[in-house]
Image (cartoon, rainbow, N blue to C red):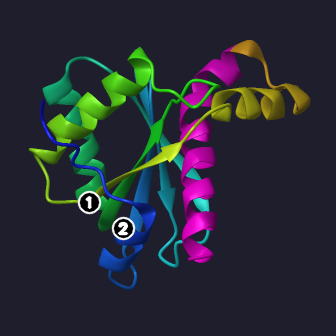
Amino acid sequence: MATDPTISLEDLAARLLPGQRLIGMDLGTKTIGLALSDVTRTVASPLETIKRVKFGKDAAALLVFCDEHEIGGLVLGLPYNMDGTEGPRAQATRAFARNLANLTELPIAVWDERLSTAAVTRTLLEADASRARRAEVVDKMAAAYILQGALDRMRSL
């Protein structure tokens, strides 16, 4: 079995240079939600949603964003089961990270994303967003939720 290329948030924080941003990712079966940190790595903002085609094209689109935004690392939401175990979706996410690590030198950390989509959906419902609007933004907002959690944790290190 291939080794896990992901690193801890502590190691990610230690590798970053001043001004480098992070990209957060919410990896779904049909889309990849992307979020971007500011240069001080304080605030995460929804960036884009990539419609998944196949790994090579998905990774190429992601790496274009990384080049455009001076990215220093990636935070990939890891969908643990509610009991803390890893199921098929977490395994697919780890496989994505392994494959992506073969294409970039950027460090990749994972962050527990349990309930991120549910929290974002609840927020959108409270804001009275239409079903179409929720579908349009939920993935990139979930990515921002994931990245914000990681940023908050990194600030406390």
Element at label 1? loop
- Magenta-tinted stretch: 132-157
Q: Name the residue type under label 1.
A: Pro
Magenta region includes residue 122: no
> What is the quadrant of the C terminus in the image?
bottom right
In the figure, is residue 123 to the left or right of 115? right
Element at label 2? helix
Q: Residue at x 54, y 70 (%)?
A: 154
Task: Name the one closer to the observer, 2 or 9.
Answer: 2
Asked whether the residues under the numbered discs 2 and 1 touch, taking CB atoms below 8 Å apart as contact, a structural biologist would say: yes
Q: Residue at x 43, y 70 (%)?
A: 10
Q: Name the residue type under label 2.
A: Leu
Classify 6 as above or below 97: below
- Mark sitting earlier along the chain (2/1): 2
Residue 124 at x, y percent in the picture: 79, 30
Residue 62 at x, y percent in the picture: 28, 42
* Residue furthest to the left: 102
| Circle 1 crowding by C-alpha within 10 Å: few under 14, some 14–19, many from 20 | many
Classify 10 as above or below 58: below
**Residue 59 visible within the image:** yes
- Which residue is the site of mark 2? 12
- Which residue is the site of mark 1? 107
Look at the magenta stretch and give its main secondary structure. helix
| Circle 2 crowding by C-alpha within 10 Å: few under 14, some 14–19, many from 20 | many
Q: Residue at x 32, y 57 (%)?
A: 7
Could you tell me how far apart the alpha carbons at marks 2 and 1 are, in whole angstroms?
Answer: 7 Å
Residue 121 at x, y percent in the picture: 74, 27
Magenta region includes residue 148: yes
